[in-house]
Amino acid sequence: MNFELKTLSLAAAAAHKCDLLVVLVPEGFLPGSDVLSTMVAHALKQGDLEVKPGKLLQCYAPAGVAARRVVLLGCGAADAHAVRQAMQALAPSFKLPSVKRVALVFGTSAQRGAIGAAVRAVADGSYVYTATKTKAEPRALLRVTLGVPDAGAAQPEFATATAVAAGVEFAREWANRPANHATPTLVANAAKTLAKYPGVQCQVLGPTEVAKLGMGAFLAVAQGSDQPLRLVELRYNGAARTQAPVVLVGKGITFDTGGISLKPAAEMDEMKFDMGGAASVLGVFRALAELRPAINVVGLIPACENMPDGKAVKPGDVVTSMSGQTIEILNTDAEGRLVLCDALTYAARFKPAAVVDIATLTGACVVALGGLRSGLFASDDLLAAQLLSAGDAALDPCWRMPLDDEYAEGLKSNFADMANVAGRAGGSITAAKFLQRFVGDTPWAHLDIAGTAWKGGAAKGATGRPVGLLVHYLLERATVSTVKPKQKTRSRKSVA
Ligand code: BES
Ligand code: MN
Ligand code: ZN
């Protein structure tokens, strides 16, 4: 699917040939003398159209308009939220086989974030999962034109949005694939395909190397599975080597049965989404490859299955993490923190400016925040503020949760330095406190995406969150952090 941005008046939009033309109608719409303006003005006057987001009026091949279908779409204040809400009403149209070319036209100037929201809505609405279906029609939509009053001014927002859309789609696709089609090896191979883009490199470690590193916690989770574990290391270099990277760590449990602490059968299939954090890291790299911002990023994905087996780790087993700290595994279903803790220890070798882990970590987080906001835990107020505002800007919001030291008391163990679970109370917080023991002094944040990475029920499927949040956060860093060369006179070499 191709997105293009064009300067387009409503008069010009009327002459634009496409299968579906969407005219966004904001509050205080100022009609011109063109045919679309006249239609909108009449419809508003007659009460057949309202400007409230999502209210719409469908027309077919109206005289003087080149498009076959025309939708007049109320978009309220025309800000990002309102545009997204409005576009949701149209989502089914973007999957129609007869709709190959779509144009969206913003009559008057669009508010900040509105173009991004529109691009994301079309991309999300037109995505179809086909990988394991023999009869599914692939996406019909080929070309999407965004018509705005000033294409030059809208270009940066448009570029970010199309890159995020590509990243979200990559994340959705990998998270959606069933566990037998998205094994740790296949997920690692997906990461390797990203290395074809300039500036992106990928290295994959297997069980032998991971054992050599002393990642006893990660190994313990993987030992009950016939699928060999993978540790994926992605790198994106857009800035000088001297610039400290941001390290993203994504939980990559390709299937979580719970292990010996087996989960109940109901909805266990959804545990194929337990690599949503990993998928979001892949999606971020897909977006970075397109945007090429001046920043360095490392992506780490500890990937394995959590299975019950004769060789599986047992409740009460004590393992030694890469950090040297010992862990009593009281519940084998609290496996995410075990794979993450070793990856977090490993992250220190990149001397990061910040570490952000992303994980479908706790059911408790779903109870606390539902599906709207991801849980944000941060040791650093600045990092927390940056992630919160990135989430708002990307319409991919999160909510800060506490990290008081007292919450860690339940992690005490009689047989190891710590247990991997505390009581039921505050389960998402005690999980975060566990992770915090492996990050040292580096500014660190943890995003619990258990409620936001996928939807259950009839619309079951991955959301691609929080790719938008993370990309916005990284781009913001790229604009504020200017690279300081060591000597003023030396010019920076371009990367070969
Ligand atoms: N992957 C799950 C968390 C999860 C559960 C995400 C349901 C989304 C929906 C995680 O590995 C897990 O099983 N966590 C346990 C932790 C508990 C044993 C302390 C949980 O949340 O029940
Ligand atoms: Mn689990
Ligand atoms: Zn899990």
Image (cartoon, rainbow, N blue to C red):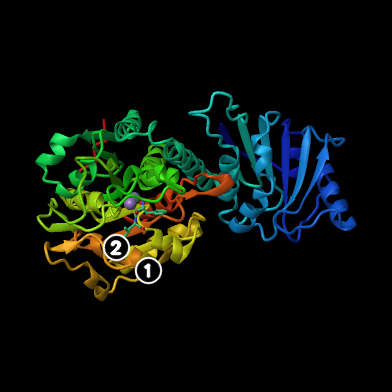
Q: Give the residue furthest to the top.
A: 134
Residue 193's x, y, as percent? 35, 29
Amino acid on which the number 2 mark rests in the picture: Ala
Whole-percent x and y of residue 104? Answer: 67, 42
| Neighbourhood count class around disc 1 (C-alpha, 10 Å): few under 14, some 14–19, many 20 upward | some
Q: Nearer the viewer, residue 428 or 117?
A: 428
Mark 1 touches mark 2? (CB < 8 Å): yes
Residue that mark 2 sits on? 432
Res. 188 image quadrant: top left
Determine the CA span between mark 1 and mark 2. Answer: 10 Å
Image-quadrant location for residue 53: bottom right
Residue at 27% over, 48% down: 260
Mark 1 = which residue?
A: 401
Give the left or right position of residue 469, taking residue 90 as reference. Answer: left
- Label 2 secondary element: helix
Task: Describe residue 136's horizontal placement relative to residue 196 as left or right.
Answer: right
Q: From where the camera sits, is residue 153 visible?
A: no
Residue 354 is tagged as none
Q: Is residue 262 left or right of residue 457?
A: left
Q: Would you call the spot at circle 2 few (<14 residues within 10 Å), some (14-19), or many (20 or more)?
A: many
- Horizontal and vertical percent position of residue 399: 43, 65
